[in-house]
Image: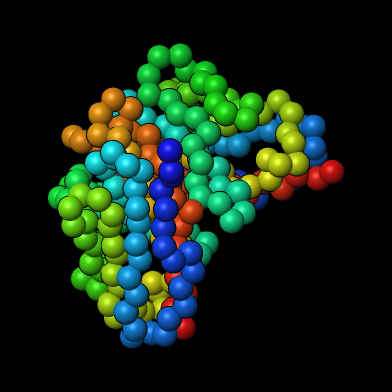
Amino acid sequence: AQSVTQPDIHITVSEGASLELRCNYSYGATPYLFWYVQSPGQGLQLLLKYFSGDTLVQGIKGFEAEFKRSQSSFNLRKPSVHWSDAAEYFCAVGVIYNQGGKLIFGQGTELSVKP
Amino acid sequence: EAGVTQFPSHSVIEKGQTVTLRCDPISGHDNLYWYRRVMGKEIKFLLHFVKESKQDESGMPNNRFLAERTGGTYSTLKVQPAELEDSGVYFCASSHPSGRGYEQYFGPGTRLTVT
């Protein structure tokens, strides 16, 4: 069965420090992978996605993620965190079928940023 | 372009009552999805519409939940009668029917509290 694991429920980093959020997935075929972010009071916003091709994908707000098939991972990174990055981050795998597909989410990682 | 909108933003009802949630997708998006996040858990898929047809309703928890999408535009999700375990945040998402149709755009969610 398809699943996504985000091992870290809560992470705290200092502003300006680098960030890596972990995501591991289980999926039988080539995965469609996503990272979403939810800021307080907001909906889910798509940060970046991987469908195929280059395994290092760039997203919005200076985020990037690397797909590693051998490790079944799709970790999210940012070289320098800003206070506005404090939010909850969700990794998801897309189960694709005709005319669309559903998302299977991890449990989410809440990011706090220290001044 | 307007995003996905959901109404109401919050709803507090008593056990046994009925609640109807509404979602307006992005104009032109044939795919419409409902998801739910129960407190402390991951976001879970409920169902997927393609226009007015249910493509996948494998995530609907039981027959107290009824989703409709008359005319292939907005959708409603009715819970009748509501139980305590139905409390959570209900998200709606939509995606374009072709090309990058796997990118789902989320609304802000409806927070449902059943007391």
- Marks counted in the figure total 0
Q: Is residue A114 left or right of residue A52?
A: right
Of residue A37 and residue A56, the one placed in the foreground of this image is A37
Question: Given the current orientation, which residue lies at the most extreme top position?
Answer: A54
Extreme residue in the left direction: B53
| Residue B68 quadrant | bottom left
With respect to residue A9, does B88 lie above or below? Answer: below
The answer to whether residue B21 is left or right of residue A56 is left
Q: Nearer the viewer, residue A9 or A78?
A: A78
Q: Position of residue B13 (x, y in %)?
A: 43, 81
The residue at 48%/54% (across/down) is: B108
Q: Is residue A51 above or below residue B94?
A: above
Relative side of B73 to A21, left or right: left
What colour scheme does the image use? rainbow
The relative height of residue B77 versus residue A54 in the rendered view (above or below) is below
The one nearer the camera, A22 or A42, is A42
Is residue B49 in view from this perspective?
Answer: yes
Q: Where residue A69 sits: x, y (%)?
A: 43, 23
Residue under the point 24% across and 62% down: B67
User: Could you tell me if residue B42 is visible in this image?
Assistant: no
Q: Quadrant of residue B26?
A: top left
* x then y, percent, for residue A39: 60, 49
User: Which residue is at a point 74% across and 36% down the rendered structure image?
Assistant: A82
